[in-house]
Image: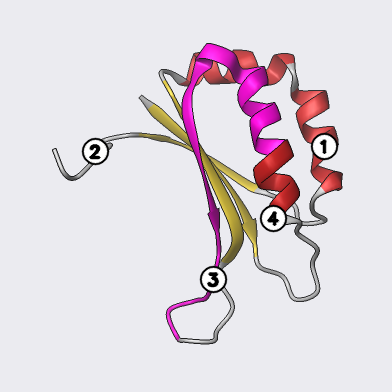
Amino acid sequence: MIKVTVMYPYTEGARFDHDYYRDRHMPMVKARLGSACAYYTVEKGLSGRAPGSPPAFVAMCAFICESAEAYLAASQAHSAEIRGDIANYTDIVPVVQLSEVVVERSDR
């Protein structure tokens, strides 16, 4: 199992529409990924470690997928549409990381 994490670094004055991201972009991406994506998560950065400090990332999402190959095949087939939608919610360049999921849930 893999996790694809997309992170949007906090930048003073940058634009990020959390409602659009949550309600429109992420469901669209999940629909395009189809069965390659088991589920996704969305996070909204609140602060850094010190109260009142800015978060390292204004937003993050993670796609939990069976394999990197399945994710890459599904995402590449729709990459123009997915990337083209980014301008609708942010002017931040995202950072992407693919990781192997070693522990999915710590309560098991």
| Mark 4–mark 3 distance (CA, rounded to whole Å) | 12 Å
The image shows residue 24 at horizontal and vertical percentages of 73, 38
Identify the residue under disc 4: 18
SS label for mark 2? loop
**Residue nearest the viewer, comparing 1 with 106:** 106
CB within 8 Å, label 3 to label 2? no
Crowd tier of the residue under label 3, counting other residues whose Cα lies within 10 Å: few below 14, some 14–19, many 20 or above: some
User: In the image, what residue occupies the spot 80% across and 63% down?
Assistant: 15
CB within 8 Å, label 1 to label 2? no
**Residue nearest the viewer, comparing 46 with 5:** 46
Q: Earlier in the sequence, mark 1 or mark 4?
A: 4
Q: Quadrant of the C terminus?
A: top left
Find residue 46 and name its label: 3
Q: Quadrant of the N terminus?
A: top left
The three-letter amino acid code for the residue at tag 4 is His
In the image, is 43 to the left or to the right of 14? left
Q: Above or below — where is 25 with respect to 58?
A: above
* Magenta span of residues: 25-50
CB within 8 Å, label 3 to label 1? no
Crowd tier of the residue under label 1, counting other residues whose Cα lies within 10 Å: few below 14, some 14–19, many 20 or above: some
| Disc 2 versus disc 4: nearer the observer | 4
Q: Earlier in the sequence, mark 1 or mark 2?
A: 1
Find residue 103 and name its label: 2
